[in-house]
Amino acid sequence: MRPLIFAANWKMQVTPAEARAFVARFLELHPPREGRALWFFPAAVSLEATTTALQGRGDTRVGAQDVHWEPKGAFTGATSIPLARGAGATGALVGHSERRHVFGETEAETGRKVTALLAASLTPMLCVGELLAEREAGQTEAVVIRQLRAGLAGVSPADLQCVVIAYEPVWAIGTGRTATPADATVVHRAIRAELARLGASTRMSVLYGGSVNGGNAASLLAEVEIDGVLVGGASLDPVGWAEITGT
Ligand code: PGA
């Protein structure tokens, strides 16, 4: 069975106390399953509570939603990789569309974060995806490939296998609109072709994200190109999340 990744992005929600309660309930509902890995991306202040609550569950990992590329310094409000690691993170989202389009993160900054995470032996989950206007203008693949190249610019072919890619069309995030499995597959194929050009020798995990829920997860995961899902809204309730992770 091909390994599947289920990643929960809690965004700016879930306090430390709520994370503890969520994990306790979720773990009752989701025993470890062969060939499935679970990621949780809580807010920075809830990293440690989430990590501690998940202790002993080797099928789970915790990551930061964003990191700065500098290890320390005068960057008020930012989370460095050592700070995230100290709170239990073993990876981080990079270039999530909200970082790019709400906070103005540049593609060059995304690349610096990926490189810094790899240098620290943490897993970057690099998010790429086009805006609705870009899709309508027929630019989807060009945008996604440009974001991939920028995000992976400093990454050696050997290190590529340590990176997880998440394709998240911006128009599908939090909108209730999901790419069809066939639409997602087209973009996933383009991503894989580019990863091969960049020198990836083994199959890298490429996830899909954007309004994934209990009703559509199975059909997306049935696509051979889709190695897992990155989920925001539908990961906030432990019962609903366990339904998805048990898909
Ligand atoms: P959504 O968010 O599932 O709420 O669309 C996905 C994401 O932003 O990663």
Image (tube, rainbow, N blue to C red):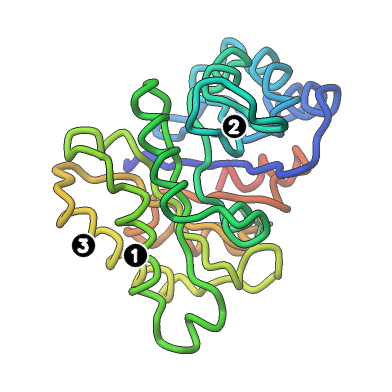
Q: Which image quarter: residue 235?
A: top right
Q: Residue at x 71, y 34 (%)?
A: 43
x%, y% of residue 10?
71, 42
Q: Which mark is residue 64?
A: 2
Residue at the disc numbered 3:
193
Q: CA–CA distance between discs 2 and 1? A: 24 Å
Mark toward the viewer: 2 or 1: 1
Would you name the residue on which mark 1 appears? 146
| Element assignment for label 1 | helix
Would residue 137 be found to the left or right of residue 44 on screen?
A: left
Labels 3, 1: front one: 1
Look at the picture and state if 71 lies above or below 10: above
* Rendered image quadrant of residue 147: bottom left
Sequence-wise, which precedes: disc 3 or disc 1?
1
- Relative to 137, is 3 above or below? above
- Residue at 49 percent across and 71 percent down: it is 130
